[in-house]
Image: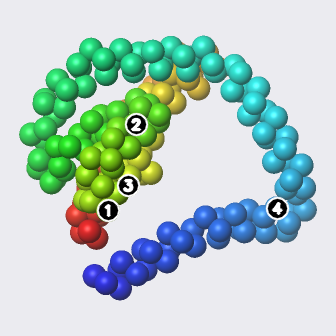
Amino acid sequence: MELFKLIVEWLSILAIPVIILFFLGFGYVKKVKVYEKFVEGAKEGFNVGVKIIPYLVAMLVAIAMFRASGAMEVLTDIVKPITNLIGMPSEVLPMAIMRPLSGSGSLGVMTELMNNFGVDSLIGFISSTMFGSTETTFYVVAVYFGAINVYKTRYAIPAGLLADAAGLITAVLVCRALF
């Protein structure tokens, strides 16, 4: 188990620099002007950002209403028996529920958990691992699909929620095994 922990630590330290070097090297081999393409993409990203602001505001208002209404607590109470089966602490449930809805909302929940239980606690590890291994599925669908006028999302939401569930379950199991 100690060897596994050591390997995971080294992989987490090296992952981002290796990915960056890979893309820079790949661009060099393909003779792509990486910096110019980066700036071009950043310009395009700014235009997309301006276009999605109305959808972003609508989603943030809906999330604030969801939390303020007490629906978060009701949903947490309903889901608690299921999460007990995989060993997920009930304190982490608001994070698991909020993450598919909002990145900033889930960051707030995670910060609150870290302040209450500590960053080196099992709850702190599970919540931060959930934050990094899941996506804001409903936010992505509402904002990005709305920005390009796609109203029939087909399998995007079920696939996204399935991936989120896999990330949540894996976060709990891996954190329980490592910490």
- Viewer-closest of 26 and 45: 45
Please name the residue shown 13% across and 38% down the image. Answer: 80
Q: Which mark is residue 107?
A: none
Q: Which mark is residue 129?
A: 3
- Viewer-closest of 125 and 44: 125
| Quadrant the C terminus occupies | bottom left
* First in sequence: mark 1 vs mark 4: 4
Secondary element under disc 4, as helix, strand or loop, is: helix
Report the side of 63 relative to 19 (left or right): left
Tell me how far mark 4 sits from mark 2, CA to CA.
37 Å
Please name the residue shown 78% across and 39% down the image. Answer: 42
* First in sequence: mark 3 vs mark 2: 2
- Extreme residue toward the bottom, this view: 3
- The amino acid type of the residue labelled 1 equals Asp
On the question of residue 171 being in view, the answer is: no
Q: Which residue is mark 1?
A: 120
Q: Are marks 1 and 2 in contact (CB under 8 Å)?
A: no
Q: Which mark is residue 108?
A: 2
Q: Are marks 4 and 3 in contact (CB under 8 Å)?
A: no
Q: Which mark is residue 27?
A: 4
Secondary element under disc 2, as helix, strand or loop, is: helix
Vertical order, 22 against 65 (above or below): below
Q: Quadrant of residue 83?
A: top left
Report the side of 82 relative to 136 (left or right): left
Nearer the observer: mark 4 or 3; the answer is 3
Nearer the observer: mark 3 or 1; the answer is 1
Q: Quadrant of residue 57?
A: top right
Please name the residue shown 50% across and 14% down the image. Answer: 58
Tell me how far mark 3 sits from mark 2, CA to CA.
15 Å
- Viewer-closest of 128 and 114: 114
